[in-house]
Amino acid sequence: MILIRAMKREDFEEVFGMMKVFYASPAVLHKASEEVLRRDMEDCLSDMPFVEGYVFEEEGKIAGYAMAAKGYTTEYGGICIWVEDLYIKPEYRHRGLGTQFLTFLEKEYEGRAVRFKLEVEEENKAAIEAYKKSGYQISQYFEMTKEVDAG
């Protein structure tokens, strides 16, 4: 059975290792630096109100992690939860952990969040199909971004 729980300080090194694998993979376009990944971890472990870190655990072993960011959508009039990272170790894949996490997140924000979002690479057909089974749809928006140095 999988336990989904908040990230803890003692998870730092193992999750950080998974983050490095995730950010070096074709699943992401931008390859974040180790400094940025460490800041992400520290923010998840602090009282930062905009991001939460989760760990998937099976029989005391970490099977994966996720990070979710909180925002507001004026288009839908409420909280939007953005699944930033969702990584599952290869030996735990194809067992429904991602789906379990998305269901967990919806229950966590039931009655508060009006929209859930995530990004997926177009080539990642298996992930796209899994997300569709969880009720996600391909957005018709063309996204634009601008990055600035946060200091």
Image: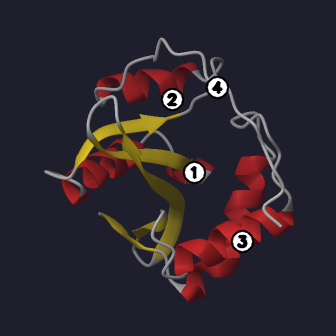
Q: Nearer the viewer, mark 4 or mark 3?
A: 3
Q: Earlier in the sequence, mark 1 or mark 2?
A: 1
Measured from the top left, where is residue 97 in percent x and y? 39, 49
The Cα atoms of the two marked residues, 1 and 4, are separated by 14 Å
**Residue visible at 84% across and 56% down in the picture:** 149
**Residue 96 seen from this side:** no
- Which numbered tag is attached to residue 121? 4
Residue 126 — which label?
A: none
Q: Quadrant of residue 147?
A: top right
Q: Earlier in the sequence, mark 1 or mark 4?
A: 1
Q: Amino acid at mark 4?
A: Glu
Of callouts 3 and 1, the N-terminal one: 3
Mark nearer the viewer, 3 or 1: 3
Q: CA distance from mark 1 to mark 2?
A: 11 Å
Q: Label 1: which residue?
A: 87
The amino acid beneath tag 1 is: Tyr
Nearest the viewer among 129 and 47 is 47
Image quarter for residue 60? bottom left
**Residue on which the image places disc 2:** 127
Identity of the residue furthest to the bottom in this view: 10
| Helix, strand or loop at mark 2 | helix
Chain-order first, disc 4 or disc 3: 3
Camera-nearest label, 1 or 4: 4
Alpha carbons under labels 3 and 1: distance apart: 18 Å
